[in-house]
Amino acid sequence: MERISRLRSELKSKIGDSLLPGDEAKIQKILGQAINDKQVKFDVFGFNPIVMALQTALIAVDEIGLRRDGVIAIILYNGVINGYTTMEEVRDDFGDGVAAIIKGLVRLYHLYEKTPVIETENFRNLIVSFAEDMRVILIMIADRVNMMRELRDTINEEARHRVAEEASYLYAPLAHKLGLYKLKSELEDLSLKYLERDAYYHIKEKLNETKASRDKYIVDFIGPVQKKLEEAGLKFHIKGRTKSIHSIWQKMKKQKCAFEGVYDLFAIRIILDSAPEREKMECWQVYSIVTDMYQPNPKRLRDWLSVPKTNGYESLHITVLGPEKKWVEVQIRTERMDEIAEHGLAAHWRYKGVKSSEGGMESWLASIRTALEAGDDLQVMDQFRMDLYDKEVYVFSPKGDILKFPKGATVLDFAYHIHSNIGSRCIGAKINGKNVTLREQLSSGDTVEILTSNKQFPKQEWLNIVKTSRGKAKVRQALRETQMSTGLYAKELIERKFRNRKIDIDESILMRLVKKMGYKETADFYKDIVDETLDVNTVIERYLEMKQHEENPQATAVPARSAEEFQLMPDTKHVPQTSDDTLVIDQGMKGIDYTLARCCQPIYGDPIFGFVTVNGGIKIHHQNCPNANDLKSRFGYRIVKARWSGKGQTQYSVTLRVVGNDDLGIVNNITSIISKEEKLLLRSISINSDDGLFSGNLTVQIDDTHRLEALIKKLKGVKGVRSVVRL
């Protein structure tokens, strides 16, 4: 309770001026009653939801700029979810603004219950379109930052891994698009810490080791520059900024180099105190001073002064050759630009935004930052609704895949998007479990299950129902195929009736008869025959009458064609059978074409997933595969759940990286352990020695992860061995 009281006091000191009389007492009453009735439920990590809500609210206030409505919504959201207050009570006590935000948070809570594939751009866009009020997204980002900060001590490794993955795939990109760079960097660093612990601490230790020399270099670089800027009469301050751990790790992977190979570990930031009308001029003046002192690299000039980024970022970046022939990045900006760079959206509410000419989601996210030109409150956000909501919708398939359609798309569009045969047999759908017609329009967040019937066929009026160009093209194709099939069947039926009555068909007379009966298209004539709205016997009688009254009875009739020449085209299409079952990898499994990915070399017992390749086979990847993030982000719809079954009988190739003291006999001790292991084969070994340390790669054939863990434990027990890591 002491912690809650402290957090409440801190929060009140920051937003107290925006609270209305009675707000604090009403909140206290709701929370106090819930605590007394023991309705407050701790989450999967054992965190107190009230403490977490107050901490999230502080982040939202400090880093984003939310005020009364946003803060109250954060505090009471769990109450609505867990039932110790209602939406109606919230609206009555705190107004429509708070209720609208909580409504958006609750909608997203239920959206998550559908357990969709979140590692996709479509899911990011879906939650934005689903939220309606932008403060919902900002609160979600603040909540995830708070959660990631608190996860360090949890013992629930699986849940922590899931939360960290969501922070990396979903929340960090959203924070980046909204210009919340500080929160974005924190989310990325903490995700790396939880997902790739060794890489995180390796870089962190390296940064600590080089801090003193790095700080000295920054001082040596800044000194002469500072003197020149002061002589020019500029008001400014200079600071050095070390790159984030995640940014360094990404650079190491991209450049395929060690930590020592990343030369731009830090940047010098020159921040000017300039009047608005002198900003650009003084920034370019600083550029001139710096490049006169140090040689610039023209290929690395980034001018975001003349044309700011779509997310509102403004700055001038140059790379110069500093002391000791080291390349140094220098960022030149004003106080206003720096606040926008650090606090993104919140800062844009205090400064004039940047207009974007691009369309779609990116344009809309940029336009949010231009919504307010002045003022520190967010009252205008109560009326704010996103323009994109009128352009795109995102819906779920029954399997949880997310599909994007233009606003106004119908059930029939969805059906044809899945498969042509599904579309052509569509009779309606179930949207969120409710039966609807094929004309029903789709809305974001809908779960759509198509209903089909073998008696259904595409109709001409369907062209007016489908809204997408893809859907219209597929309807036209289906109509052509249907007409062709119908025509062949009708023709065979007519010829058989004529043959039974021993009448030869004159095609020219028959075609004239079709025209005389009022049909503009032969296909319509054949369709009526098949639908039995026109009797073939009536056609024969009319045909005989017309033949008798032909002006030229001597005209040579076209020889009758045998019905044997015509075959009804079989409908070879089928509805693909799908399954939500997990792919089980067993030694005796047959009929599934799968291979183990070389990039991560999974072995029996590893956590795995399947990836459907372009040729239809399945690649089995380790959950921690270096390519896993990219595959899940770009091709989430091709990811298949997988697990091992039975016992590991196959021998798998595994490479271990061993580092230790270069002591006499240590290598012999390592190889001796491997040779004593039953059913364990050492395939190769390579050892390098340098400055009293040795490092080497051992490649062994092993059955499963249990044997591997036991082997690693034994190798770590060898005197002098510092680390053993699986590559």
Image (cartoon, rainbow, N blue to C red):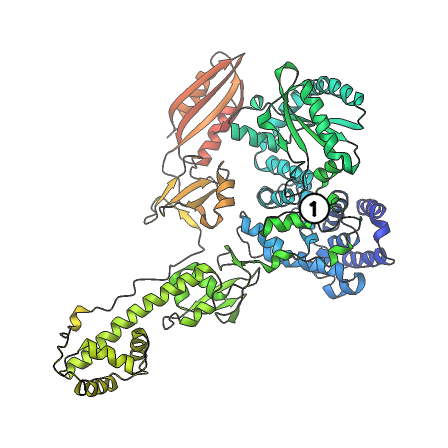
Element type where label 1 sits in the image: helix
Q: Can the viewer see residue 499 in this picture? A: yes
Residue 621: image location, x then y, percent: 44, 40
Foreground residue among 367 and 640: 367
Foreground residue among 211 and 412: 412
Residue 470: image location, x then y, percent: 44, 59
Image height check: is 607 above or below 214? below
On the picture, is 233 further left or further right than 473?
Answer: right
Q: How many marks?
A: 1
Amino acid carrying label 1: it is Ala
Which picture quadrant has residue 309?
top right
| Extreme-right residue of the structure | 21
Label 1 crowd (10 A; few <14 / some 14-19 / many >=20): many
Residue 424: image location, x then y, percent: 39, 66
Residue 457: image location, x then y, percent: 37, 71
On the picture, is 160 further left or further right than 1?
Answer: left
- At x 66%, y 47%, the residue is 355
On the picture, is 212 further left or further right than 235?
Answer: left
Disc 1 marks which residue? 142
- At x 65%, y 30%, the residue is 317
- At x 16%, y 70%, the residue is 564
Image height check: is 379 above or below 497? above
Which picture quadrant has residue 231?
top right
On the picture, is 606 further left or further right than 248?
Answer: left
Foreground residue among 612 and 328: 328
| Extreme-front residue of the structure | 551
Image height check: is 583 above or below 576? above
Q: Can the viewer see residue 644 in this picture? A: no
